Amino acid sequence: MSTGSMEQLYQQVILDHARAPHGKGLVDAAHVAAESHQVNPTCGDEVTLRVELDTDGPVPRVREISWEGQGCSISQASISVLHDLVTGVELTEADSLGATFRALMGSRGAGLDDDAEDSLGDATAFTGVAKYPARIKCALLGWAALQDALIKTGATTPQEDA
């Protein structure tokens, strides 16, 4: 695929998630392990994200992510993609996906190696966003809320990016 058609495909993925966001609508707080409210003061984007854990198995997993927020299509689509990526995964994988997405945003649009990008699925659509420093915080808003909420559950510890 040419670079132009890939960028169009990526734009379409972002628009689709912004129009019909996955996981939007907060679940009853009685079932929630932790909640995080994050605001991007630069542009006014904000999100409240709730994490429900499944601790029945040998390792804790993300049972459900629910959220409510407002802001630009990039922030809202990024949270929708995050929902799809981390629902059902082990907490260590959720941490790893967050670190990989932060690395993608630090790539200045160059992207990551194929394995890293494969792990991100639709989140690779945000590669072009990394070219625009003012928009990176928009894309990272939900991921910051996820990281904060997972730390608040007590089931994970703060991760230092490599």
Image (tube, rainbow, N blue to C red):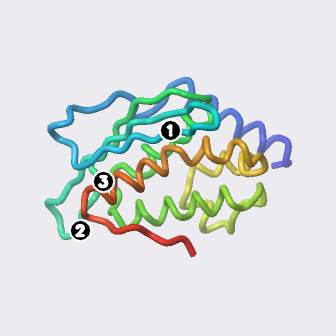
The residue singled out by tag 1 in the image is 39
Q: Nearer the viewer, residue 88 or 25?
A: 25
Residue 35 figure quarter: top left
Judge left or right: residue 103 versus residue 145: right
Tag shown at residue 59 = 2
Q: Residue furthest bottom?
A: 162
Residue sitting at x 50%, y 38%: 39
**Of the two numbered discs 1 and 2 in the rendering, the one whose residue sits closer to the viewer:** 1
Judge left or right: residue 2 versus residue 140: right
Residue sitting at x 47%, y 66%: 96
Disc 3, SS: strand
Tag shown at residue 62 = 3
Query: Where is residue 105 drawn, in percent x and y?
Result: 66, 55
- Above or below — where is 110 with respect to 14? below
Residue kind at label 2, given as amino acid type: Val
- Above or below — where is 127 with respect to 23? below
Residue sitting at x 33%, y 63%: 90
Judge left or right: residue 123 versus residue 21: right
Residue 30 figure quarter: top left
